[in-house]
Amino acid sequence: RMKYSCSHRCNISLFLVYYFAFSSDAKNPLMPPPQLESGAKRNSFQKQNDVYYDSDDETTDKQLGNFETEQLINAVTKITDLLRKCWGVAGAGIISSNLARGEGGLTTYFNPTVPGKAVYALFAFVYIDKFQSHLHALKGDIMILINDIAAVLHEEVYRWAYAERGECNKNLGGAFFMVYKIGDVTEVLQKRAMAEAVIFSRKSTSPILKKKSRHTSRNPKRYASASGRQSGNSVDSDKYSRSRVDNVDLSSLPGMRTFSDRALLGLLKTFASIHRDKTIINWNNDFRLGAGVGAASVNLNFGMDAGWAVEGAVGSSYKIDATYLSPHVNMASRMCSATKQYGVYLLLSQAVQKLLSENAQEKLRHVDTVTVKGSSVQQKIFTYDAQVREDFFLYSRTASQADMDADRYSPAIWNIDQDLLAMRNHICDEFMDAFNRGRDEYLAGNWPEAIDWLKSADKIMYERALDEGYSTEIYNEEFQSLANWTDNDDAAEQRTLMGDGPCQRLIAYMEELGGVAPSGWTGYRPLTSK
């Protein structure tokens, strides 16, 4: 009995020890509140989280459990936000594809290189002018400059983009790649076909057409070829062939002109904001950028194109980049690079010009007709004549006012917005008449007449710059016939400030070939330089 009594007492003692131990653990959350050293700090934490520290002891455990859950939700939200900022919309498809891939609801493995899909979009490259010299001058501080510029660029692009469709896909050192996604090729073409069917439908539709319509709507897999994925199912190769995808008139899509206008406005607003932002202005006064001999100027160059691209991941399981692959992406890059040749800050392709509203198109200038390397398609290129001004600060708006301006967009903005009017104030009808005449003669092959008209236009631009106080430089006659002005950065900058860059570029090109159009001239030239 004594042996049994001792054993029974030992069991009771062990039970009590385990009971209190497990009870103590149960009351401790997996993610307990931080242990604060001082009473003041703890009181401050409790005030911020008073819902979790109620005086009622009966609900404390439940509230701490809620605190755990909220902390986990916040952590997942932060991770999601970081993924969105790092990979953008292109990366969202990769992530969702991998989360959806699994057996029994569980993801079995990570496959970053999922098949791409074809999309329609506007593409823009934004390049920091003189980036290489800035890099050598600033060394490690170049990262601060890039981020300061990105803060202005991203804010304006996101503010003006239609339905939040504009985003920075990636930063390439001195360049930013912006994407304004219209939609998947399959989605755009299907909705366009549905709209056409509604517009041209009649009540007396024949049974054959109805049957065909039902057959099309019940076979969505026919559109798989447009996304770039291979499938064993039959594919209507004619309906979604490359020529059909390339030749779709995007301007016929509802809301497309508003979409395109707002994309261009975001870049032009960036141009104005970069010259009135106090942080960027401080960089202009940095003696390192001016090489110790004067004030510098942080400028941006812009290039745009529109069309299709393949959206997806490039890389391996070790490292991937969510990106867009397309000749239209390359074209946007070439437009950005060609801004230095033409002495302008922005160039956009004919594909973008066609998508803009009439008010916006009226403000553009057709500067040349070219073909780019790797393509035989003739394409007009346009510029918006943006001029750097020191008084952009006069038209500054608060963030809330700027948001309101974007929300109230209408095509009339091209004629009333103070920033847009100020940056084109140096353009007059006399100059436009002379330039258009010279450009038309150049394209027609009448080069002697073209040179005369373009020189006249260039002189008008220079004289107006002096009259309006845009330039204080003394006109130098030796620059009038300079052929390779793009090879000299200092000369290129002076020519841009004193006269009109497109006039000078066309004159230089014609004089390089003797001032007479070559035999077989067909009204365009190859844009060989990147």
Image (spheres, rainbow, N blue to C red):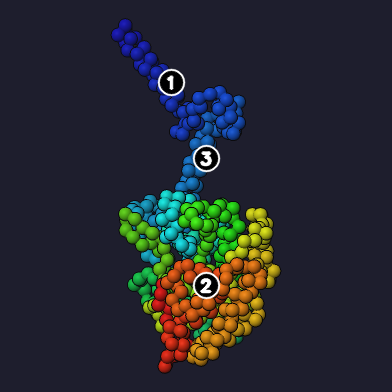
Q: Position of residue 43 (x, y in %)?
A: 58, 27
Give the residue drawn at x 51%, y 43%. Answer: 74
Give the residue drawn at x 32%, y 56%. Answer: 317
Q: Real-space Cα distance between discs 2 and 3?
A: 61 Å
Q: Position of residue 16 (x, y in %)?
A: 41, 17
Give the residue drawn at x 42%, y 66%. Answer: 324
Q: Which of marks 2 and 3 is nearer the N terminus?
A: 3
Q: Quadrant of the N terminus?
A: top left
Q: Classify mark 3: helix, strand or loop.
A: helix
Which numbered tag is attached to residue 495?
2
Question: Looking at the picture, which amino acid does disc 1 mark?
Answer: Phe
Which mark is nearer the camera, 1 or 2?
2
* Residue linked to disc 3: 70
Q: Position of residue 163 (x, y in %)?
A: 58, 63
Which mark is nearer the camera, 1 or 3?
3
Which numbered tag is attached to residue 20?
1
Question: Looking at the picture, which amino acid does disc 3 mark?
Answer: Glu
